[in-house]
Each structure stands twice: as C-alpha cells, then as structure tokens.
Amino acid sequence: MFGCVVSGRLVQTDAQQVGPTQVVFNLADAESIHHVVVFLTGTVPFPDGMGGAVFYCYPSTEGPAWQLLGFLSNAKPSAIFKIAKVKPEEVVQNPFSFQQNQDHTIAQIGISLEPLDQLAQMTPASGATPSKLNSFVEYTQKMLQNFVNYITSFAMTQSQMVPNPSESYVPMSAVQKWYSNFERKLTNDPNFWKH
C-alpha cells in the first residue's frame, strides 16, 4: 500500500506491519537522510474517512525519538518531507506498539492509519513540513544567494582597489539590483525564464 524514497536512493516498498493499522520502513544510514518521500502505491486506497499519520524516528543514544511529519490521504497520496534531527520539544510518545530498533544508524518512517478528522488536529514538527516552493524555485533561490554571497566576499572600496588595466569591476549595487530583480521575477512567475 505504501512506498518510501529517501533522496538519492531506490524506492522502498518493504514496510513491516507492526500493528493492525501500523507499518514501519527501516532507513539505513540515518545521518545521510535529508529528504524523504512517502506515498500510496495506488494498489489499495485508504478506507473512507481514513488517512495515514506519517512519523519519523531518529535513532539516538538516549533512545528513539519520534516526531510527526504530516499525513497522507486518498486526496493527498504523497508528500515530500525535509528531515532534521528531532528537537526535544517536538518528540511525541512512541505511536507504535512494538519493540524499538536499537541500531543507531537506522532511522524509521512509521505510518499509522487514523481517522481524517483526528489527523487534522495533529501538528507536524516545524522543520518537517513540506516545502511550499517547488524544488526548482527553491534551488534557484539557494543558487542565487550563494552567487551573491560569493561575489560580495570580493567586495572592496575604491580606496582599496589597485589599478589593473586588464581587470573589469562591477559595482556591488549592480549585482544586488540584478539579484532583487531576478528574485522578484521568480516569485511572480517561476517559469519566466522559459519565455
């Protein structure tokens, strides 16, 4: 019924049933997990009025720490979550009734079948909520920020400049103006560059 993909890895459909309405995916190499996609495979839908609460368990020496990432439903059959180490204030009581894995390199994604009205009352961990930006917009913004940070690291005042006839200089205000214009265009129309 469920599939799981850790960014950069193959699809997993090997969820282990750990309760009548609960399954768990084991995810190796917990330290390298940054994004995870959880989805319905399309073979079996949720029963009417039901959905799946999606939890993430980060292994730690103090014991496993579970956090709520979000949920799936027939109307929302997939979600991408950014994974961060669990903050102490976002830990939830173990929602699964099974003996916890003690391997400190294996994280887990758990899905628990719940009524949709109950899912609507749950609050996901702050850092885990799916991004509202599409990945192209997010990538472009990060790339532009990196570019501007790199360029500004070379900034100098006119008095610091050593005359060099073979060098061209661009005022920082021109780079900042370009960056602001590009970001505005991207916000207004993420596909503006295709025109």
Image (tube, grey):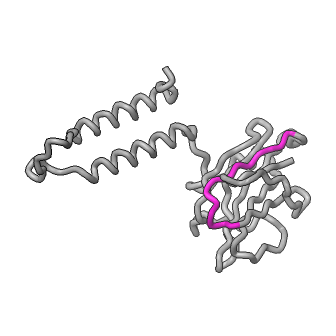
Which percent across, then down, holds residue 89? 57, 66
Q: Which residues are magenta?
A: 29-42
Q: Residue at x 73, y 66 (%)?
A: 28
Vertical placement of residue 1 versus 58, above or below = above
Residue placed farthest to the front in the image? 166
The quadrant where residue 29 appears: bottom right
Q: Residue at x 66, y 61 (%)?
A: 67
- Estimate the x, y position of residue 106 in percent, counting from the top left: 72, 69
Q: Residue furthest top?
A: 195
Q: Nearer the viewer, residue 81 or 114?
A: 81
Residue in the picture at 68% in, 71% down: 59
Q: Is residue 122 visible?
A: no
- Residue 143, how many percent across, how many down? 44, 44
Residue 162 vertical placement versus 109 (above, below): above
Residue drawn at x 58%, y 60% as measured from the top left: 84
Q: In this image, 147 relative to 36: left or right?
A: left
Residue 159 visible, this angle: yes
Q: Is residue 4 above or below residue 98?
A: above
The stretch drawn in magenta includes residue 37: yes
Kindly indicate the quadrant of the structure image that contains residue 45: top right
Residue lying furthest left in this view? 159
- State whether residue 20 is above or below residue 46: below
Q: Is 22 part of what is drawn in magenta?
A: no
52 vs 147, left or right, is right
